Image (cartoon, helix red, strand yellow):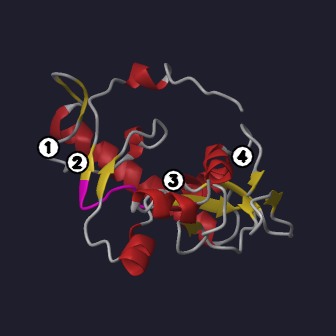
Amino acid sequence: MTFEEAFRRTGRVLCITLSPLCRSSPPVLLNYLTAPKVVISSAVIASCAAPGLIPSMRLRYKDSQGRIHDYEGVNQAYIDGSIRNDIPKDSLAEMLNVQFCIVAQVNPHILPFYNSETVGNPTEWGVGSRRGGFPLAALEFFLKVDMQSKLLFLDQMGASSCWTRCMTQLFGGSCTLIPDYKLSDIFGVSFCVV
């Protein structure tokens, strides 16, 4: 099924963000407007690709006779959109007039670094346990901001990897929901390789 077919059938807009392998190409937001003939399953598989873990994926499209083909071209391989644009707020606002984003942030590589807390009221690592009160929360916040500024500098100098770009973006929305989790939960994440 293509994005256009899904929209016609349901009347709902499905959006999938992908990052091209080419560094100079911007992230893309696929939906029935930007990629009507793209097969949704190929976009979903590409959104699972992560450098060093799961190889990049070429998108597939359906022609007017209903046959499915691979897109051909130099810059047609994609990886997970969260590498460069986890929360595509600007694209959604421009394209679909979205004004408020409710984000459920559950990425295990983002949660420890997410700066949603204030220094006086830190988030919790587990139910009932604070992360060190005001002095340690202030130190943690300082170290996070310092690390992100250094990673942003490396990215702007062209000396970064895709994982560096992943850590320098904004990960929240108008309302960001963060689950209760413990640090040990991160080690329980399992990866399924397609």
Disc with the residue nearer the chain's start (4 vs 2)? 4
Rendered residue at 71%/74% (across/down): 24
**Disc 1 residue type (three-letter):** Asn
Q: Residues within 10 Å of mark 4 (few under 14, many from 20)?
A: some
Q: Which residues are magenta?
A: 170-175
- The residue carrying mark 3 is 167
Position of residue 116 measured from the top left corner of the image (x, y, whole percent): 26, 50
Which is closer to the viewer, label 4 or label 3?
4
Calculate the distance from the C-alpha at mark 4 to the C-alpha at mark 3.
14 Å
Calculate the distance from the C-alpha at mark 4 to the C-alpha at mark 2.
30 Å
Question: Regarding mark 2 in the picture, which secondary structure is present there?
Answer: loop
Disc with the residue nearer the chain's start (3 vs 1)? 1
> Looking at the rendered structure, which numbered label has been put on residue 121?
1
**Disc 4 residue type (three-letter):** Pro
Who is closer to the viewer here, 41 or 189?
41
Q: Which secondary structure type mostly characterizes the magenta part of the structure?
A: loop
Who is closer to the viewer here, 109 or 194?
194
**Disc 2 residue type (three-letter):** Glu
Who is closer to the viewer here, 167 or 179?
179
Q: Are marks 2 and 1 in contact (CB under 8 Å)?
A: yes
**Disc 3 residue type (three-letter):** Met
Rendered residue at 61%/27% (across/down): 191
Question: Regarding mark 4 in the picture, which secondary structure is present there?
Answer: loop
Which is closer to the viewer, label 4 or label 1?
4
Q: Residues within 10 Å of mark 2 (few under 14, many from 20)?
A: few
Q: Are marks 4 and 2 in contact (CB under 8 Å)?
A: no
Calculate the distance from the C-alpha at mark 2 to the C-alpha at mark 1.
6 Å
Q: Residues within 10 Å of mark 3 (few under 14, many from 20)?
A: many
- The residue carrying mark 4 is 51
- The residue carrying mark 2 is 117
